[in-house]
Amino acid sequence: GTKSLTKTRFTTSFVKTIRIRVLRPLETSPEWPSCEDKGGTSSLSASKWTTFLKASLICVDPVTKGNFNWLQDVFFVPASNWRHSKVYGLFTNTWGSSAVCVYSFGDIDNVFRTSRLKGYNGPNPEIKPGQCVSSGQHTPSETFKIADSHPEVEDRVEPLSPTKSPLFHNKHRYQKIGVHEVSASDGRRYNVLYLATDKGSIHKIVELPDGVQNIMELQVFPKKDPIQSMILDHKRAMLYIGSTDKVVEIPMDMCRVYRNNCDSCLLARDPYCGWFNGSCQSVYLNREVRQNLNLEPWQGKCQNGDIKEDDFQTITVVPFSRYYLNCPIESHYATYNWYHNNSLIKTCNTTHPQQDCFHFIQNVSHIHYGRYVCISEEDGFRQALVKEHLVNQLRFMSQKGQATMTFGSWLQLLLMVVLVELFH
Ligand SMILES: *[C@@H]1O[C@H](CO)[C@@H](O)[C@H](O)[C@H]1NC(C)=O
Ligand SMILES: *[C@@H]1O[C@H](CO)[C@@H](O)[C@H](O)[C@H]1NC(C)=O
Ligand SMILES: *[C@@H]1O[C@H](CO)[C@@H](O)[C@H](O)[C@H]1NC(C)=O
Ligand SMILES: *[C@@H]1O[C@H](CO)[C@@H](O)[C@H](O)[C@H]1NC(C)=O
């Protein structure tokens, strides 16, 4: 049910060119323009396309005005209205940084339809280069001549409004891009970008309401073998990554990597994963999972709800004693934060190298009890490393007693209900 519609080539000033072939989804896009590019008919124009034109894509950092000139890869994301379909362009610059700019198909179409040809001042031919002819009609050879000598349009395509700036840019040198859409438990759809680095790893980057976040780095090949190809299987939510001699299959919903602790699962802000019944689960297995994708703070989300979600280590501490909270430093590029009852109480970073991130309580009093979490953050990747619930020994024991009492009275109540039922 698909056929090739247009052949379009994008270039920027210095770049290798990349060809996009758009496949027309017949069932979903009734308003896709009906136009077939069958090429020329004469021996000279037989191998040429009437719609073969080039337009430059602009991708500029608005702050530094730095240009990302080198188009590395593109990814097409179709929409039911073809004008809203998007083209994700992956660019690099001379310093090896990357940027992703997103263009709408409507804007690209406008540029091709309305722009003058670069450097062409002659009279407009009957059929403009790039213009679709209806089937049966022939493109005059004059059109091919002009398209041959002036293959580029003057206007350039700007990234999507309102910002008209890159979706993001960073210091990694990416080579390939793929985009997958996932429906999260809030019913909203999120775009997840997969970017292949030049070091054999994949970055998983998600578009969230407050901007993009890099949520995972996956080293695919142990020896940093360069990634030659990356294919997305949208239906099965799988990623296929190829090197020169291997192909690996990676599920997009890898939720086990988040340490199977509730805070790490929510902090990751991975739209494929959420917390349910004591584990970090895939939304494809369970749509009821608890996630943290909107602008609300993550703190405390793991503590309400059923007791199974409270995966804190309970530690009894007597009043007036000393206590050390200890968070192991695993990476010298990360920042470590201690939270007490969801408020930040201490930050450790490696400007002062130290063994671990300590928080010392000199003289434990009632205000020191409660929940402590140590969160590490590196390059956007966040996880909860230590979770401790400090309780007062006496109160802890009395709470336990209370729980047994409640359980006992509940049993009694149940027994009474059963007896009443029997007597009926
Ligand atoms: C919760 O997990 C336990 C195992 O840890 C399982 O026995 C139980 O059926 C699960 N409950 C639900 C509602 O999925
Ligand atoms: C700890 O604090 C209590 C009162 O808050 C005080 O009586 C006690 O002397 C303190 N202990 C130490 C070791 O400072
Ligand atoms: C490191 O911590 C100090 C205070 O402890 C803070 O002033 C500084 O900004 C931190 N640096 C980074 C990179 O977080
Ligand atoms: C933290 O919470 C615990 C119990 O929930 C409470 O006893 C303690 O006073 C709280 N401390 C602060 C500083 O909020």
Image (spheres, grey):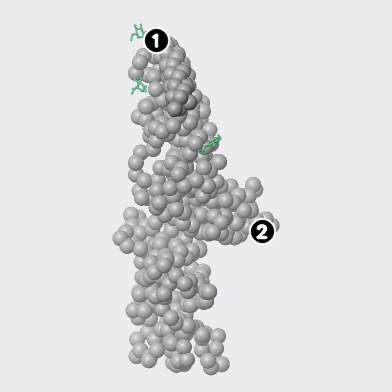
Residue 131 in picture, x, y percent from top left = 41, 84
Mark 2 residue element: loop
Q: Please state which of residues 47 and 292 is positioned toward the viewer in this rendering.
A: 292
Residue 12's image quarter? Answer: bottom left
Q: Give the answer, above or below, for where 380 lies relative to 180.
A: above
- Please indicate whether residue 407 sits to the left or right of residue 157 in the image: right
Q: Kindly identify the residue that appears in the image at 39 percent across and 86 percent down.
A: 128
Mark 2, other Cα within 10 Å: few <14 / some 14–19 / many ≥20: few
Q: Give the answer, above or below, for where 379 lies relative to 246.
A: above
- Please indicate whether residue 239 sits to the left or right of residue 30 in the image: right
Disc 2: which residue? 244
**Residue 62 makes an appearance in the image:** yes
Q: CA distance from mark 1 to mark 2?
A: 63 Å
Amino acid type, residue under disc 1 in the picture: Phe
Q: Does the CB distance between marks 1 and 2 fall below 8 Å? A: no
Disc 1: which residue? 320
Q: Kindly identify the residue that appears in the image at 36 percent across and 79 percent down.
A: 113
* Residue found at the far right of this picture: 245
**Residue 403 makes an appearance in the image:** no
Q: Earlier in the sequence, mark 1 or mark 2?
A: 2
Q: Kindly identify the residue that appears in the image at 45 percent across and 92 percent down.
A: 137
Residue 32 in picture, x, y percent from top left = 41, 75
Residue 411 in picture, x, y percent from top left = 47, 21
Mark 1, other Cα within 10 Å: few <14 / some 14–19 / many ≥20: few
